[in-house]
Image (tube, helix red, strand yellow):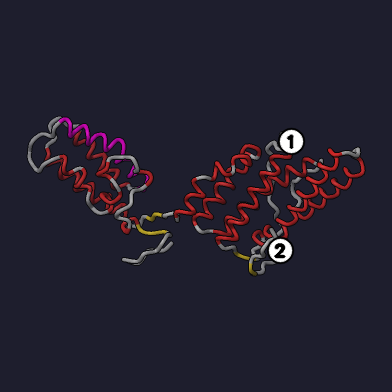
Amino acid sequence: MWNRPHGSARAYGLVRLTDLLNCSLIGLAGLVSELTLQDIVGSQIERGLVRLVDDSDDVIAEETRSRLKGWIEKIGYAVAQEYEMSAARDRIERFSQLIAKPDATNREVHYQIKALREAVDDGLRGQFLYRYPKDKAEVLASWKRDWKTVLESFSDTEADIKAGVDIWALGHHTASVFHMMRVLEYGLGALARNVGRVFDIQNWYNIINEIEAAIKQEDKTLARGPEKNERLRFLSEAAKEFSYFKDGWRNYVSHNKCTYDEHQARSVMEHTRHFMTILASNLSAEVLAKSDQEPDQNPESPHQSEAPERLQ
């Protein structure tokens, strides 16, 4: 993690919350306007809460008491919990006990708000916030819709798809490719089952060879006709595509042979989604049933090189 230098204009990355005085956290969006991140981080909680009370010994008005209780219940505890502010949580607890007293005065509440502000400010020091670039945020926001067909047919892929898209948006492009290869393993297992094979502990090279051998056997045994031609065409193209994935990307990312940039990783992501959609549309429900798969555990000697470009 890095700390953004004061006054710099970094487009995105991990930055201190105190650098984002005009930003509202997603977790606080839609809540009362006086509790935006600007008010909290900018040491200006008073702008929201203090203005509800004056610095007098009068008992707080019931309307004010109600608003303060609402803030504590809906926002105060949530902020302290979300950002692991134990001191602020303790202060909020004291605040809650105070306003529960029927004779609590404006002066007492005023003092507690100032103390709470300081506790929140202290708790926010060292916190970090990541802002997704707009174009990447749009891709991340639509991942379930974009991958809908794949998710419906390969439900076990959800965690890896979500992680792959998310970390691509975060800028960890090589890691995104790794997750896409994990997604493809579910498709490889389904294709293997479709031809009577089991993808268990084999590496990709061996299971693809088994699939291709099974396809050749089907070519000998299936009755001639358009159904046979269509099936063999689909199986052969799918097996060949997995070979492309293996040689072009999977071996490189799994065995530490290269790193990927934003555009290469996006290309891998789109190829994976397109191909898994084709598999989902052509394989039966039976072979699409969930199955646990072990990743290949046979690393080759690492060697860094540029990521190869695949022919489209």
Of residues 39 and 231, the one nearer the viewer is 231
Q: Main structural element of the magenta stretch: helix, strand or loop? A: helix
The earlier-in-sequence mark between 2 and 1 is: 1
| Residues at discs 2 and 1 in contact (Cβ within 8 Å) | no
The residue where tag 2 is placed is 300
The amino acid on which the numbered mark 1 sits, given as a three-letter code, is Ser
The answer to whether residue 79 is magenta is yes
The answer to whether residue 175 is magenta is no
The amino acid on which the numbered mark 2 sits, given as a three-letter code, is Glu
Instruction: Answer with left or right where residue 48 lies relative to residue 267.
Output: left
Instruction: List x then y, in percent, for residue 146.
Output: 57, 44
In magenta, the rendered stretch is 62-84
Q: Residue lying farthest front?
A: 226
How packed mark 1 is, by other alpha carbons closer than 10 Å (few <14, some 14-19, many 20 or more), is: few
Residue, x 64% and y 64% (percent of image)? 256
Q: Secondary structure at mark 1?
A: loop
Q: Classify 67 as above or below 160.
A: above
Residue, x 85% and y 43% (percent of image)? 229
Mark whose residue sits in front, 2 or 1: 1
Residue, x 77% and y 53% (percent of image)? 240
Q: Secondary structure at mark 2?
A: loop
Q: Which mark is residue 284?
A: 1
Of residues 170 and 118, the one nearer the viewer is 170
Count of numbered tags? 2
Instruction: Answer with left or right where residue 110 lies relative to residue 248.
Output: left
Instruction: Answer with left or right where residue 93 lies relative to residue 263.
Output: left
Of residues 105 and 265, the one nearer the viewer is 265
- Distance, label 2 to label 1, CA atoms, is 35 Å
How packed mark 2 is, by other alpha carbons closer than 10 Å (few <14, some 14-19, many 20 or more), is: few
